[in-house]
C-alpha cells in the first residue's frame, strides 16, 4: 500500500525547539545527494569511498562465522568504551603514523563523526571559539554549530595551515576576550582542500596551541591513503597530552560499519566514555567484531595499497582533465593522497549559484561556501575523485569546464 505524501502544514512544534537547533542547517552536499545520484549526472560532489576492492565473499563468510560461533556476544550490548581487542588493534593501526598509545585511552565511536560530536559536547559551551582551517570539513562545522560554538578560520596554503595565521587568530581572540577551546585540524589530505600539513609546521602548530592553552583535535581519516605509501607523523605523536586524535575505518575499510575512534588523554577519555554511554550506550558490537576480525585475518595493509593505487589513478585522471579542459584563470590543488581537489574559479563566478546549471549539464560538485562557517568561499568548489571511474571523471570535468565557460561569458 502506498501512503500519499501528507499535505504541507506549518510546523506546530516550531516554538518548542532548543535554541541550539538554530545552528542545525541542511548540508548542501546532503541536499545534493538525490540529484547527484541520478545515473546521467557525473557526481564529483560526494566523498564516498570506492569499495570495489573489498573481498565481499570472504567478508560475508566471516560475518556468518562471527554470528554462528560468537553470536550471543556479537548481538549483545557491550562496553561503552569499545571492545578491548579492537582497541588494541587500533593502537597498531595508529603506530603506522608514529603514535604510541595504550588501548585504555582509545574509545570506539560510531564513525569519527560521533567522535567529533562528543568532543565538541565535552568542551564547547555556547559562544566558545573553535579555530579551524579555512576551508574545513562540513561535518565538523555542523557539530560546532550544533553546540553553538563560533568558528574562526585560519588560512591555508599549499603546505596546510599557516602557523603565523594561527598565532594571529589566537592573539586576536585573546585580545577580544574570547575563549578559544579547540583547534580542529585535518593535517593529512585535507577535506576539502586536498593539501597536507608540511612536516616543519607540525611541531610549530602543536607548540602554538600549548602556548595559548588550546586543545588540538586532530582529525585523520585519510592518513593511510597517501599515494606514495608514506605516512606523516601525527600531531598526537608530537604531543600526547594536548592532542585528541580522531580515527576512522570509513576510508580504509567500510564506512557503512560506522566504526571510528578517539584517542584521548586519560581524563578526557573517561569523560568520553560517559558521553558515549549517554549518547548510544555502546558502539555496535557486531560491527566492532567484523572490523576486529578483518584486521586480524586479512592483509588489510595490502588492501589499503590497492585502494591507494585506485585513488591515485583517479586523481591523475582528474588532474589531467582539469589541465586539458578548464578555462584560463582556474587554479586547483594537487593532492598527494585522499579524495579531493579544491578548485578556485575566476572572479565573477559564484559556485553556489552555478550549481543548478552544472547539474542541468549533468555534473555535480560541492560548492565552496559550505566549507566555511561564514559561508564565504563563493569562488571555490570541491571535486571528489574517489568514486567515479577515470572515464566518468574526465567526462565530468569536461562538462564542468563547459559550464564555467558559459558562466564566464554570461
Ligand atoms: N572527518 C573528515 C575530515 C571526513 O572527511 C569525514 C567523512 N567524510 C569524517 C570525519 C567522518 O567520517 P566517519 O564518521 O565516516 O568516520
Image: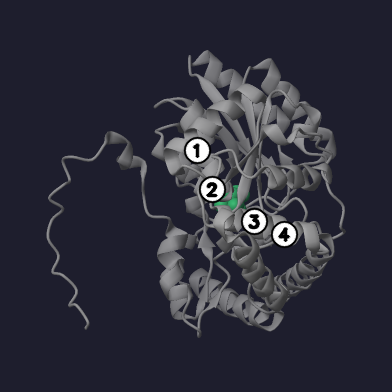
Which secondary structure, mark 3? helix
| Marker count (numbered) | 4
**Which quadrant is home to the C terminus?**
bottom left
Judge from the rendering whether residue 70 lies leftward or rightward of residue 404; answer left or right.
Answer: right
**Which quadrant is home to the N terminus?**
bottom left
Position in image of residue 207 (x %, y %)? 75, 22
Viewer-side residue, 405 vs 311: 311
**Residue drawn at (36%, 41%), measured in percent from left and top?**
23
User: Could you tell me how far apart the alpha carbons at marks 4 and 1 are, in whole angstroms?
Assistant: 23 Å
The circle on residue 293 is: 4
Q: Is residue 330 above or below residue 12?
A: below
**Tag 4 and tag 3, C-beta contact below 8 Å:** yes
Residue that numbered label 1 is attached to: 276
Viewer-side residue, 212 vs 159: 212
Residue that numbered label 2 is attached to: 283
**Tag 2 and tag 1, C-beta contact below 8 Å:** yes
**Residue drawn at (73%, 61%), measured in percent from left and top?**
294
> In this view of the protein, can residue 334 be seen by the observer?
no
Residue that numbered label 3 is attached to: 289
Judge from the rendering whether residue 32 lies leftward or rightward of residue 386; answer left or right.
Answer: left
User: Could you tell me how far apart the alpha carbons at marks 3 and 2 are, in whole angstroms?
Assistant: 11 Å
Q: Is residue 225 above or below residue 85?
A: below
Mark 2 Cα-neighbour bin, 10 Å: few <14, some 14–19, many ≥20: many
> In this view of the protein, can residue 403 be seen by the observer?
yes
Position in image of residue 14 (x %, y %)? 17, 45
Which secondary structure, mark 1? helix
Q: Earlier in the sequence, mark 2 or mark 4?
A: 2
Amino acid at each position: 500500500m502506498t501512503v500519499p505524501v501528507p499535505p504541507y502544514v506549518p510546523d506546530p512544534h516550531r516554538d518548542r525547539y532548543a535554541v541550539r537547533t538554530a545552528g542545525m542547517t541542511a548540508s548542501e552536499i546532503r541536499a545534493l545527494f538525490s540529484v547527484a545520484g541520478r545515473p546521467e549526472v557525473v557526481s564529483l560532489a560526494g566523498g564516498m569511498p570506492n569499495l570495489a576492492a573489498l573481498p565481499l565473499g570472504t567478508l560475508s563468510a566471516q560475518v556468518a562465522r562471527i554470528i554462528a560461533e560468537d553470536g550471543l556476544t556479537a548481538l549483545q550490548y557491550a562496553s561503552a568504551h569499545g571492545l578491548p581487542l579492537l582497541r588494541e588493534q587500533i593502537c597498531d593501526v595508529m603506530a603506522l603514523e608514529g603514535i604510541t598509545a595504550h588501548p585504555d585511552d582509545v574509545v570506539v565511536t560510531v564513525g569519527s563523526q560521533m567522535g567529533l560530536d562528543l568532543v565538541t559536547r565535552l568542551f564547547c559551551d555556547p559562544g566558545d571559539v573553535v579555530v579551524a582551517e579555512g576551508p574545513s570539513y562540513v561535518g565538523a562545522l555542523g557539530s560546532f554549530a550544533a553546540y553553538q560554538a563560533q568558528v574562526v578560520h585560519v588560512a591555508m596554503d599549499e603546505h596546510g595551515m599557516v602557523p603565523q595565521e594561527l598565532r594571529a587568530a589566537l592573539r586576536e581572540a585573546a585580545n577580544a576576550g574570547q575563549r578559544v577551546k579547540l583547534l580542529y585540524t585535518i593535517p593529512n589530505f585535507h577535506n576539502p582542500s586536498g593539501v597536507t600539513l608540511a612536516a616543519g609546521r607540525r611541531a610549530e602548530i602543536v607548540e602554538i596551541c600549548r602556548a595559548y592553552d588550546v586543545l588540538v583535535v586532530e582529525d585523520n581519516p585519510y592518513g593511510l591513503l597517501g599515494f606514495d605509501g608514506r605516512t606523516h607523523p601525527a600531531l598526537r605523536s608530537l604531543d600526547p597530552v594536548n592532542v585528541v586524535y580522531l580515527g576512522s575505518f570509513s576510508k580504509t575499510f567500510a564506512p557503512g560499519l560506522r566504526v571510528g575512534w578517539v584517542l584521548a588523554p586519560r581524563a578526557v577519555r573517561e569523560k568520553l566514555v560517559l558521553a558515549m554511554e549517554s549518547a548510544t550506550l555502546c558502539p555496535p558490537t557486531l560491527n566492532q567484531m567484523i572490523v576486529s576480525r578483518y584486521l586480524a585475518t586479512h592483509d588489510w595493509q595490502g588492501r589499503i595499497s590497492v585502494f591507494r593505487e585506485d585513488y591515485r589513478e583517479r586523481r591523475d585522471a582528474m588532474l589531467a582533465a582539469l589541465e586539458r579542459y578548464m578555462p584560463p584563470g582556474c587554479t586547483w590543488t594537487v593532492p598527494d593522497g585522499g579524495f579531493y581537489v579544491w578548485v578556485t574559479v575566476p572572479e565573477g563566478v559564484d559556485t553556489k549559484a552555478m550549481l543548478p546549471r552544472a547539474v542541468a549539464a549533468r555534473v555535480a560538485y560541492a560548492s565552496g561556501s559550505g566549507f566555511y562557517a561564514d559561508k564565504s568561499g563563493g569562488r571555490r568548489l570541491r571535486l571528489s575523485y574517489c568514486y567515479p571511474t577515470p572515464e566518468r571523471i574526465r567526462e565530468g570535468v569536461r562538462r564542468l569546464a563547459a559550464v564555467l565557460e558559459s558562466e564566464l561569458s554570461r
